[in-house]
Image: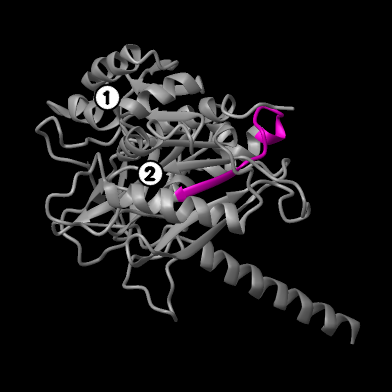
């Protein structure tokens, strides 16, 4: 009987091993369904940090890997075809590998099939754009550790909130980061950073692509930044003919009249300018110039990432509308952080923007980095800015 039991156990174990091996073995690319799911790694980081993309799309013709974040993937701005060309292997999978290593960081990507750019159906991370979604991949490496999840440190929480904007007469959305320990400490109050996204993004982007929550977690754990609440508003409003992306009054009204009061009412914030900062990238930098810089009575520290006066007459209109408020900003003497990449297509906006602040004797720190209009820079700017805006006690 013992021999029979042993034989049965051995056969059962062999069957499990065989089944597992069959599942792990390369499987022919076919149309997946619930009974026959496809298990494969959609993006593989090779030992030299190149990325290999795989796609099962049996009916696709000429798919390409598309990314505005990954420099190793052609952008199309140089007149050449955008994206990486994919080739089909013996099992029917489309694949492509970047010619150069990809620096450590987090990147959005997708596939262009039949004239449409689509998210990777096998991805497990996604980012909401202004319209649609992108799939997301993180390339691991020491240089990107500051923006990566670290199991050894305490982590905050990110909530999605919806609220009624009386100013706009509509329901709006924001993401809110609360630092580690916020829920356990019911009396402590925290400074607040309002952090705005770019024109192609949404209020989800600063966490899904920017990893703002991990950046703050790691800085707080290292004692380099004060525990703070980070509010990430929706930078877009309902489009109206003649609306100005730079001086978007609807965004400003909602921010100042609805969102800031809501956060001060519903969260344990320190409700004064010294403990309330504003920053943004690209379009969000424009919002920060338009509604943060002139409002020293609401926002203290200011951060402008990859934005400035880039259109003819923009500076003159801004100054004419905000002369008295800019004088108040100069008197406030709170820190202004202005950052731009050397190869950013908006680099020409640096000179007139600095000239305006020099004219009003607004104190600011200018940072010029390598690279261009990229999340690689914006994550680094946030890391830098977050360490200086509130005093560590």
Taking the magenta stretch, the answer to whether it contains residue 248 is no
Above or below, 90 relative to 339? below
Above or below, 117 relative to 27? above
Counting from the top left corner in percent of width and height, residue 63 is at 21, 53
Counting from the top left corner in percent of width and height, residue 210 is at 46, 41
Q: Which residues are magenta?
A: 220-232
Q: Quadrant of the N terminus?
A: bottom right
Kindly identify which residue carries mark 1.
344
Counting from the top left corner in percent of width and height, residue 17 is at 64, 68
Above or below, 300 relative to 82? above
Kindly identify which residue carries mark 2.
197
Q: Which residue, as the protein is rendered here, is positioned at the far right?
A: 2
SS under mark 2: loop
Taking 55 as reference, is 26 left or right?
right
Taking 100 as reference, is 36 left or right?
right
Taking 214 as reference, is 204 left or right?
left
> Is 311 or 363 nearer to us in this picture?
363
> Is 304 or 224 nearer to us in this picture?
304
Q: Quadrant of the C terminus?
A: top right
* Crowding at mark 1 (Cα within 10 Å: few <14, some 14-19, many 20+): some
* Crowding at mark 2 (Cα within 10 Å: few <14, some 14-19, many 20+): many
SS under mark 1: loop
Counting from the top left corner in percent of width and height, residue 158 is at 57, 54
> Is 222 or 40 nearer to us in this picture?
222
Numbered mark located on residue 102 in the image: none
Does the residue at mark 1 contact the one at mark 2 (Cβ under 8 Å)?
no
Taking the magenta stretch, the answer to whether it contains residue 221 is yes
Which residue appears at 83% of the width and 78% of the height? Answer: 6
Give the quadrant of residue 366. top left
Total label count? Answer: 2
């Amino acid at each position: 009987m013992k021999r029979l039991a042993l034989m049965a156990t051995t056969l059962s174990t062999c069957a499990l091993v065989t089944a597992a091996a069959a599942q792990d073995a390369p499987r022919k690319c076919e149309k997946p369904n619930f009974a026959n799911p496809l298990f494969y790694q959609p993006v593989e980081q090779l030992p030299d940090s190149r990325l290999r993309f795989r796609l099962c799309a049996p009916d696709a013709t000429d798919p390409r890997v598309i990314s505005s974040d990954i420099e190793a993937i052609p952008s199309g701005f140089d007149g050449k075809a955008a994206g990486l060309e994919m080739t089909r292997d013996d099992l029917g999978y489309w694949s492509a590998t970047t010619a150069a290593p990809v620096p450590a960081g987090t990147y959005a990507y997708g596939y262009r099939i039949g004239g449409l750019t689509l998210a990777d159906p096998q991805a497990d991370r996604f980012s909401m754009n202004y319209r649609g979604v992108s799939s997301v991949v993180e390339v691991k490496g020491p240089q990107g550790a500051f923006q990566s999840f670290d199991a050894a440190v305490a982590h905050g929480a990110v909530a999605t909130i919806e609220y009624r904007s009386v100013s706009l007469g509509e329901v709006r959305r924001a993401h809110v980061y609360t630092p580690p320990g916020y829920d356990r400490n019911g009396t402590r109050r925290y400074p607040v950073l309002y952090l705005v996204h770019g024109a192609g993004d949404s209020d989800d982007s600063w966490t899904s692509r920017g990893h703002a929550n991990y950046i703050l977690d790691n800085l707080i754990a290292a004692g380099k930044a004060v525990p703070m609440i980070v509010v990430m508003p929706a930078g877009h409003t309902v489009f109206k003919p003649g609306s100005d992306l730079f001086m978007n009054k609807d965004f400003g009204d909602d921010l100042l009249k609805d969102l800031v009061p809501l956060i001060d009412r519903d969260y344990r914030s320190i409700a004064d300018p010294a403990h309330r900062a504003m920053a943004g990238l690209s379009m969000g930098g424009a919002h920060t110039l338009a509604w943060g810089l002139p409002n020293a009575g609401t926002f203290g520290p200011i951060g402008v990432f990859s934005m400035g006066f880039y259109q003819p007459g923009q500076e003159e209109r801004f100054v004419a509308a905000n002369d008295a408020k800019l004088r108040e900003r100069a008197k406030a003497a709170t820190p202004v952080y202005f950052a731009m990449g050397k190869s950013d297509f908006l680099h020409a906006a640096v000179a007139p923007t600095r000239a305006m602040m020099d004219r009003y004797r607004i104190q600011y720190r200018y940072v010029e980095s390598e690279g261009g209009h990229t999340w690689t820079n914006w994550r680094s700017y946030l890391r830098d800015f977050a360490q200086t805006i509130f005093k560590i006690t």
